[in-house]
C-alpha cells in the first residue's frame, strides 16, 4: 500500500537548519532513505513538505481517500495545531509521529503534542533514522490489520 510521509514547517531547511540539533542530512536524503525502506517492504511513498498548515491537512485528507498510512513530522505544528489533530482524527489507518530531535530534552513548550493524542506511536530523538523506523512500524501495522 501507500505510505504518506508528511513534513511540517522549516523542514525544507533540514541539513542547514541548526545542525547540532537536527543533523546534516537534508530532506532529500530523508526522502531517498524512506523510498529505499518502503521499496524493501513493498510499499509506495508519497513524500511531502510544507510550511503551510492547510497543505498538511489536505494531504491527510488525500491519505484518507487512498487508505494509506501516515508518517508525520508536524515540526512546530506539533505543539500548536488542533486542526492537524482534527484531520488525523478523520483518518482510520496507522499514524506514526516522528521528531528528529528529542523534544523531551528541550524547551517545555515542545513537551506537549496535539498529534500524540492520535498517533499510534511516537519516535523522538533518533535523528533522521526515526523516519525509516516509522515506515517499518507502519508496514507492520498494515500487515497486522490485513486478512
Ligand atoms: C521537530 C521538533 C519540533 O519541536 C520543532 O518545532 C521542529 C522539528 C523535530 O523533528 O525534532 O521543527 O519536529
Image (spheres, rainbow, N blue to C red):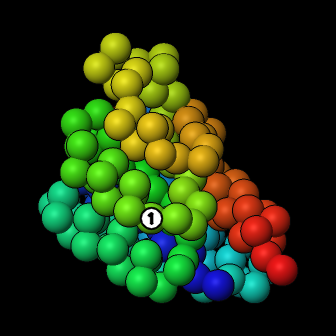
Residue ID at (47%, 80%):
46
The 10 Å Cα crowd at callout 1, few under 14, some 14 to 19, many 20 or more, is some
The N terminus sits in image quarter: bottom right
Q: Which residue is mark 1?
A: 91
Q: Under 8 Å from ligand 1: the CB of mark 1?
A: no
Judged from the image, the secondary structure of the residue bearing numbered disc 1 is loop
- Work out whether 120 lies above or below 142: above
87 left or right of 47 in image: left
Q: Going 79% across and 76% down the picture, which residue do you hit?
A: 146
Any part of residue 19 in sight: no
**Quarter assignment of residue 6:** bottom left
- Determine the residue positioned at 22% across, 51% down: 83
Q: Position of residue 21 (x, y in %)?
A: 43, 33
Residue at the spot 58% in from the left edge and 41% down from the top edge: 122
Q: With respect to residue 121, does 21 lie above or below?
A: above
Where's the C terminus, which quadrant? bottom right
Image position, residue 106 (x, y; %): 40, 18
Amino acid at each position: 500500500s501507500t505510505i504518506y510521509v508528511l513534513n511540517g514547517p522549516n523542514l525544507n531547511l533540514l541539513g542547514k537548519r541548526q545542525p547540532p540539533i537536527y543533523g546534516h542530512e537534508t530532506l532529500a536524503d530523508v526522502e531517498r532513505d524512506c523510498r529505499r525502506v518502503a521499496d524493501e517492504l513493498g510499499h509506495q511513498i508519497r513524500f511531502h513538505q510544507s510550511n503551510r498548515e492547510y497543505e498538511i491537512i489536505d494531504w491527510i485528507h488525500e491519505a484518507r481517500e487512498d487508505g494509506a498510512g501516515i508518517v508525520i513530522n508536524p515540526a512546530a505544528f506539533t505543539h500548536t495545531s488542533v486542526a492537524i489533530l482534527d484531520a488525523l482524527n478523520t483518518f482510520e489507518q496507522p499514524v506514526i509521529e516522528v521528531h528528529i530531535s528529542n523534544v523531551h530534552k528541550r524547551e517545555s513548550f515542545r513537551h506537549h503534542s496535539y498529534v500524540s493524542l492520535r498517533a499510534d506511536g511516537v519516535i523522538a530523538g533518533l535523528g533522521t533514522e526515526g523516519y525509516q523506523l516509522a515506515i517499518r512500524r507502519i508496514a507492520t501495522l498494515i500487515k497486522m490489520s490485513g486478512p
